[in-house]
Amino acid sequence: MALDFVYDDEYHVHIARAREIRASHPEVRALMGTNPATALWTIALVLVQWGVAIGLTQVSWIWVFVAAYLFGAFANHALYALMHECAHNLVFRNPAYNKLLGIFGDLALFVPGAIAFRKYHLMHHQYLGLYDKDADIVSRTEGRLIGNSTLRKTLWVFLLGLSQALRPLRIKGVDFVDRWFLANVVAVLAVDALLLVFLGPKALAYIGLSTLFALGLHPVGGRWIQEHYTDGDGQETHSYYGPLNRLSFNIGYHTEHHDFASIPWNNLPKLKGLAPEHYENLKSYRSWTSVLMRFISDRSMSTFNRIVHEPRTRSADATSAKSSPEQ
């Protein structure tokens, strides 16, 4: 196994495909916009998670773990999908309202992440595959530490949330802390403290374990591999069209999302149906579990199975950003 990434000079195939779709299917613009109903789903899921946490205060610890794995992980993974909608301003037109909703969704996720995710995820779209600017890519040090060992990959997946939280630290030139970030931290820590004081450790543990499983060793954890890891097919982004999209607000339509980041979750299947000639011939997946199990067990795969582009000039960055308003 080569301890380095897959390099490709062709940058941002999504820009070219989006341009072709807009030319051949101008009606695609009708799919763009906001979906305020996402706010109701976010509020409902947070309240449901708090309700389950209350119900677990009088049960044995084993049921806390079981509930977190069999139910809480799906709920919190869905909340991360809705946080993703907030990051792209796909709920309200006012960015501040999207930030506030993202922070509210964080109140059932144990750790503050909405504002930091928003900042670095938008960079991920703009600089997809650029090592120094895309925080979705592991560091070379992390990749070499994990290698292709089944055990180390299993541990890495289990603690993927920690990896994702620390990864932005290698991105230079970004103001990490601002008033929104501080508000996010204060709000989440305050709610965690209230859960612990008034409901006890089992309620808080349920919330924390739900997030741990949602980001790691769980069927929905295959999403983090599905999106941008390659097995030599030369394809930078992959979609998932399996049944768990129903519980994850179509977050599996990842190729479509990178083509048109201004289309909300409810319209992504419509985009695929509108332009099937652009998506049906691409490699996609039907099972997150199989994606995850293959990544862990296949010694030819590692965290280096990512397509990375050589850095471009500043003028080229500006040109590509202007040419792709959807990104």
Image (cartoon, rainbow, N blue to C red):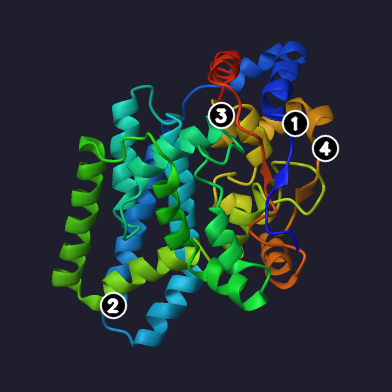
How packed is label 3: few (under 14 Cα within 10 Å), some, or many (20 or more)?
many
The residue beneath circle 3 is: 261
Q: Is residue 198 left or right of residue 90?
A: left
Q: Residue shown at 24%/54% (left/top)?
A: 188
- Look at the numbered disc 1 and give the secondary structure of its residue: helix
Check the picture and name the quadrant holding the C terminus. top right
Numbered disc in front, either 1 or 3: 3
Q: Residue shown at 55%/50% (left/top)?
A: 248
Separation of disc 4 and disc 1 at Cα?
A: 10 Å
Nearer to me, 271 or 144: 144
The residue beneath circle 1 is: 273
The residue beneath circle 2 is: 202
Separation of disc 1 and disc 3 at Cα?
A: 17 Å
Q: Residue shown at 70%/69% (left/top)?
A: 293
Q: Residue 133: where, in percent of width, then height?
A: 50, 37
How packed is label 4: few (under 14 Cα within 10 Å), some, or many (20 or more)?
few
Separation of disc 1 and disc 2 at Cα?
A: 45 Å
165 lies above or below 66: above
Q: Earlier in the sequence, mark 2 or mark 4?
A: 2
Amino acid type, label 1: Gly
How packed is label 2: few (under 14 Cα within 10 Å), some, or many (20 or more)?
many
The residue beneath circle 4 is: 280
118 lies above or below 24: below
Separation of disc 4 and disc 3 at Cα?
A: 19 Å
- Look at the numbered disc 2 and give the secondary structure of its residue: helix
Check the picture and name the quadrant holding the N terminus. bottom right
